Every structure is written in C-alpha cells, then in structure tokens.
Image (cartoon, rainbow, N blue to C red):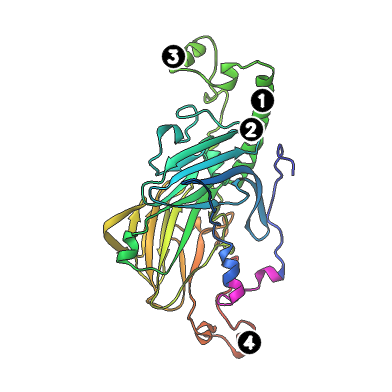
Amino acid sequence: MKRRQFMTYGMAALSASALSPGILLAESTRKANQGRFASVLEPRMDGDVKEFLLYVDFHEQELAPGMRIHTLAFNGQVPGPELRVNIGDKVRVRFENRTELNHTIHWHGMYVPWRMDGVPYVTQMPVMPGQTFTYEFEAKPYGTHFYHCHWGTLLHMQAGMYGSLIVEDPDDPVRKRFPYQREFTLVYSAHDVNFLRAELNTMLERMKERRYLMAKGRFDSERFALFDTKEDLQKAIEGGYQPPYVTNRRTMAELPRPNWFTVNGASYPSTPNLYIKSGENIRVRLVNAGTEEHYLHLHGHDFHLVCNDGIPLEQPQSMNTVRLSPGKTNDIIIEGTNRGIWTFHDHDTRRVTNNGLYPGGNLLALVYEDLPPEERMVKGMGHDQMKKMSMLPKVALDE
C-alpha cells in the first residue's frame, strides 16, 4: 500500500455467511477466539536481560466484517503484542521506526529511569523515520500496565499504537486470595476514523516537507514549531510568528468524535469472548488505551475488583459495573456461579455502536463452556421457526 496516502474505507455489504452464527462451544470457535487476544511476545535472552523487538509500521485493521481502516501498529497487530515479564526482570526493548512519522514509547505505570519514559523533547528526542531507540528498565511495579506512543498522542494512540504490559509475581497476591485458572486481557479504545484518515494524511505530508528541509540543512524553529524555551517562543511571536494553535491558522477545534469503539482492536461482532466453567475463577485485565470513559457491566454476576492501576486492593470490592477511565487499568475476578451466556458491555451504550448503529462497539460475551446444548435452544417460537433458529446467540447488526 502507499504509505503517504490513506484510502477511504466504508461499510461493505455483508454476505449471508458473515451473518451465520458460530457455535460458541465448538472447538474451532474457541480456537479462533484465541486470535482475538494479543499474542504474547517472547523475549530473547541476552545474559540475564529479557530483550524484546518492537517495531511500528502501517497496518490495515478490520474493525468489524466489511469495515477496514489503515492504522499504525506495533509488530503488525492492534493492540501490539503483550509483553509479560516477572517483577525485577531486566528488560531491554529495541524499538524500530519503520514509518515516515516520528514516534516514542511510553511505559504507562512503570517505574522506569526518566530517560526511558518516552516523552519527546522532555526525556528523549523523537525516534525519527528509519531510526532505532533502545529502552532499558527493571520490571516494576507488579500488575497490569500498558505501553503506547507518546508522539502525536491524540492521533497515534487511536491509530493503534498501544499494547499491554504485564508484570507478574511468582508469589501472586491475587491468585492467593482468588485462585484463578485462566486470565484474559481486554484493551479498550475509541476511534474517529474520519479524523484518523485526515490527520494521518496531513502528518505524512508535513513530515515529508520537514525531512526535505532537514536534508537540505534548512532547519527553521518556526517552521518546525520547536523552540528551546518559552522565552524563545515569546520572542518569535513578538517578531510576527503565529503559533499553529491560533485561530487564524486553525479555525476549528478539530477534535476527534469517536464513532468506532474497540476491544482488542475490534468491534462487535468481532470482539472476543470470555470463556469460563461452573466453579471456575477467571481473571480479566481491563486496560483503557483510548480517550473515552467506559462503565463496564456484566450481566448475571457480581465480580471482584482486585487491582486498581495494577495495585492489589487490600479490600477487594464486589460490583457488577466498573468505571474504566482513560489511562486506567483494572483487574477483576469473575466467579463461575451462574451458568449461561452473559453480556459484558459498556453501560454507556453510545460506546456499544458501530458508526452510530446499535449493537456494536465494546459488546462481548461471557460464555460457560459447560452449558448444555438444550439450554441454548430458542424459547417462545413456533416449531418451524425453531428449526430455522434453534440455537442462541445470533449475530444482530440492527436492533
């Protein structure tokens, strides 16, 4: 694809096969569901250091059947690969920039040395096209964290540059209190696909111009909007310079208005399922890498909030709706006490839409693997209709 120009993607007509419901308890369905969670990136050992390679490039992402957009992505996936380390591990991340834009990586919630914090022009210079930067830190504190680009943050994060970072403890305090057999990571985000397309095109053109000027030795602070101090900026304004945020240079607010809401890079009906069995505990790690606030509600159960921003709670709280603000991580334990197929969704239902159409967005299901087939039969329908629609759930695109 041409990196300098992003194409407009719209909704395509869905085929009948795309509407056919999968059998949630089939082995093939459960195996396919694993692909709806970020893969775990295995490190290379260099002595006692765990070394990871992260690169960013352009990527085509399917939000839902028939809806594809161009994004930025770590290692060719949205979200980026999950990094899992033990508390105290020595970590080295080699970051390669394979795009024509600037980037950095910020390790959200981590106690890294300040030079490793990934804030451009504050802790480091941006990683320019074709460049590599190496981050090194000790893995702490314990818990659920994430990483994301901190250059052009409003754009690059909703463009897909985020991923989960899990710091484990062999003496896990959560497992001690709530023995769990499985865990799942859900990374939430929100996207204005029109803003995304327009801003990426604009940024690519601007970077093309800046790289040309730099190659010609024609760096200009005003053209690059880069000053050593606030006083230098003030002097430039007194000399006639107009900052890029003044109204005669930027007449509209042009802030994104998200119209797609994703879990692990996809919207319903492509969102992942959470599988559980009667009597089993599962741990669900919730990460908000987007700009919207979510109120995540589970039907048929209360769950236990056990970690806030990775920090284990001394007094876990029981609830059925948890608030997940931008930049937050929460860990919950779900106990398999009420067999069935249950909805887990944002109770602000504006986030449960695809381009304004309900249902969509961050709607997914908690599925009991030991649910007998007879309990999934459609109730309250005539015999002929039962033959045609014998099992639940169905894929509904417009209620």
Residue 176 at what x, y percent from top left?
A: 31, 65
As shown in the figure, which amino acid type bears the numbered disc 4? Lys
What's the distance in space between the residues labelled 1 and 2, CA to CA?
Answer: 9 Å
Instruction: State the quadrant of the C terminus.
Output: bottom right
Magenta-colored span: 17-29
Residue 189 at what x, y percent from top left?
A: 51, 50
Q: Which residue carries the number 4 mark?
A: 387
Q: Are marks 4 and 1 in contact (CB under 8 Å)?
A: no
Q: In this view, does 36 lie above or below 92?
A: below
Q: Are marks 1 and 2 in contact (CB under 8 Å)?
A: yes
* Most distant residue in the top direction: 239
Q: Say which label, 3 or 1, has the lower sequence index.
A: 1
Q: Which residue carries the number 1 mark?
A: 211
As shown in the figure, which amino acid type bears the numbered disc 1? Arg
Q: Residue 231 carries which label?
A: 3
Q: Is 168 or 59 nearer to us in this picture?
A: 168
Q: Say if residue 178 shows up in the picture.
A: yes
Q: Say which label, 1 or 2, has the lower sequence index.
A: 2
Q: Residues within 10 Å of mark 3 (few under 14, many from 20)?
A: few
What's the distance in space between the residues labelled 4 and 1, CA to CA?
Answer: 64 Å
User: Considering the numbered disc 1 on the image, is that residue within a helix, a strand or a loop?
Assistant: helix
User: Considering the numbered disc 4 on the image, is that residue within a helix, a strand or a loop?
Assistant: helix
Q: Which residue carries the number 2 mark?
A: 129
Q: Say which label, 3 or 4, has the lower sequence index.
A: 3
Q: Is residue 386 above or below residue 201?
A: below
